[in-house]
Amino acid sequence: MADVKKVLMVTPEFYGDTMVGGLAMAVSGLSNSLMQLGMDVAVMMPCYAKSGEAETYTREPFATKGGLVVHETEVNGIKIYKVSGINPGLIEPQKGSVQQKQESVEFDFQYVPDINDSAHTGIYSSHMDKKRFHALLRFANAVPRAMEKANLKPDVIHLHEWTSASASFFLRNLWYPQTNKIPVVLTTHNANYSGTIPDMNETPEDMQNRFAHLNHILGSHISAGNRVFTSLLELGSEYSDFLTTVSPTEAQEILAGREGINPRVLEVFKRKGLEGILNGLDPDVFNPINDELIERFNPQNPDEVSEAKKANKRRFTTLYSEKYKTRRRQVNLDPDKMWITMMCRLTNQKGIYQTVYALRERFGINTAQLLIIGDPLNSDVKAHVESLGRSVFTHTCFAKPELQHLALAASDAILQPSRYEPFGYTQIEGMAYGALPIVTDVGGHHDTIQFYNGDNGYGFKIQDLSTKSINNAINNAEQAYQNQGLWKELIQRAVKEDFTWLGPRGSAKKYLSHYMRLIEAAEKK
């Protein structure tokens, strides 16, 4: 590139700062890779009221006139701008015109839990309540003003997930002429979550349905075309220049009208286009050769993998008994057994109920050690998981990195019977650590796994979400594990896969190419 181009990532999560799931890994990994490709990368995100850990900032906040506060910190050489404060300015119609509403309300985001928080609902709730909706809308509205305060002048802006999506509208807003020509990319990481606008119980009398409240907030600029937006993702997609999702098969499944996709969002995707670009793995974070959280090993040395697995199983057991004690008695973990681990957010999407039903049928089968680790969607999921008793190891809390990395290093296989899977980081993280995937053939699973057919491949396919299919796939993996010569060969096939952002799949370069195309088109306008 003749000159260094600048990209601003707008996201609710970033690895090393605030993390709930794979989104944080995706944004940080892509950011790190783009920097290696010569781009100048900055990140903007909400400054959460609570995060489970003390917030620290390397510098004093920028000027706070108008109540908006922008803190600057840094993660792995990438500048992070955290937006907080009161009165960020919310556009609202008054007497037929659109004006800035002056309102003293602080951002109020749900917090990211610590390891002992079992009541976590997080920033990704199954529904949008009034408080969360207003907080997200205020953050989106604050993005162009925060850019001005921090003197950020990106060449392209990349929004991530529905939680940031509506920023595209405000970036196109007539109050911010300095931003309305900057190209905007929007990536949806899970299109089944669109940020549906809730019933605010305060819609004007002349509005015919509850979704029209968004028009009431955003003003006449958006209602002039008689368009009523039903979700933040729909709004963000309409005002973005380029739409992506996190794997090619996920894009195909969305455009085919997968169950649960907001039909209004689908209409925008079909009209404007949706490209699937495969997420990548950050080798600086997930690499068993230099991972300080585990007993390190070279995954391409078969004998070293076997010994390291046993060592990490013992280390996992010790860490858990010493640091994550619970009142509920746990199963006695056996380092000599095969470990099969399901580690994810425990939701219906991940097939958690079907997994519990399947594992109940395995009571008394004493071959492999089953582990379920993750943050349950609600108390019902938690109760179902813990109903497995001492037959299955369960940790129904958010897995911090030390526990997550040790689980990957200790596990022999990763279980993930997802109903749909936009990308699915756990299967490729597991493969990097010599843990083979037992998964459904959907979305990102389809794009990242070669299933074992007796001759080639290394993964074990779950044909459908019946308890029989889940247990058949587990049984197939167990049988292969009994043949250690075969198992070592399958591991070697898996660990040779390169899913890094800068690897042969070229995901980071694809984003760079699209950025440059959009920047060049904007410069010609």
Image (cartoon, helix red, strand yellow):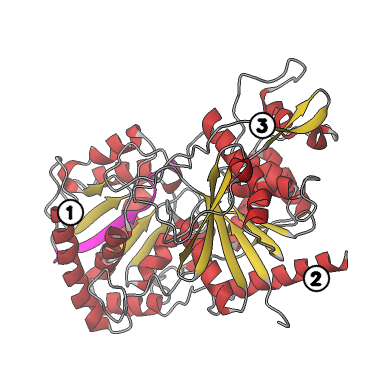
Kindly report the distance in space between the C-alpha atoms of the residues bearing marks 1 and 2: 53 Å
Q: Residue at x 33, y 33 (%)?
A: 379
How dense is the environment of label 2, judged by Cα within 10 Å: few (below 14), some, or many (20 and up)?
A: few
Q: In which quarter of the image is residue 457?
A: bottom left
Q: Mark 1 points at which residue?
A: 323
Kindly report the distance in space between the C-alpha atoms of the residues bearing marks 3 and 1: 47 Å
Residue 256: image location, x then y, percent: 66, 49
- Judge whether 318 appears above or below 33 on screen: above
Residue numbers of the magenta segment: 335-348
Name the amino acid, label 2.
Glu
Dot 3 falls on a residue whose secondary structure is loop
The residue lying toward the viewer, choosing from 29 and 136, is 136
How dense is the environment of label 1, judged by Cα within 10 Å: few (below 14), some, or many (20 and up)?
A: few
Q: Name the residue under label 3.
A: 102
Q: Residue at x 51, y 68 (%)?
A: 78
Image quadrant for the N terminus?
bottom right
Which is closer to the viewer, label 3 or label 2?
A: 3
Tags 1 and 2 touching, CB below 8 Å:
no
Asked whether residue 186 appears in the rendered view, the answer is no
Kindly report the distance in space between the C-alpha atoms of the residues bearing marks 3 and 2: 38 Å
User: Relative to 137, is 109 on the left or the right?
Assistant: left
Asked whether residue 480 appears in the rendered view, the answer is yes
Dot 1 falls on a residue whose secondary structure is helix
Dot 2 falls on a residue whose secondary structure is helix
Residue 120: image location, x then y, percent: 37, 39
Q: Name the residue under label 2.
A: 520
Q: Which residue is drawn at 52% across and 71% down?
A: 32
The residue lying toward the viewer, choosing from 11 and 249, is 11
Which comes before the other along the chain, label 3 or label 2?
Answer: 3
Name the amino acid, label 3.
Gln
Which is closer to the viewer, label 3 or label 1?
A: 3
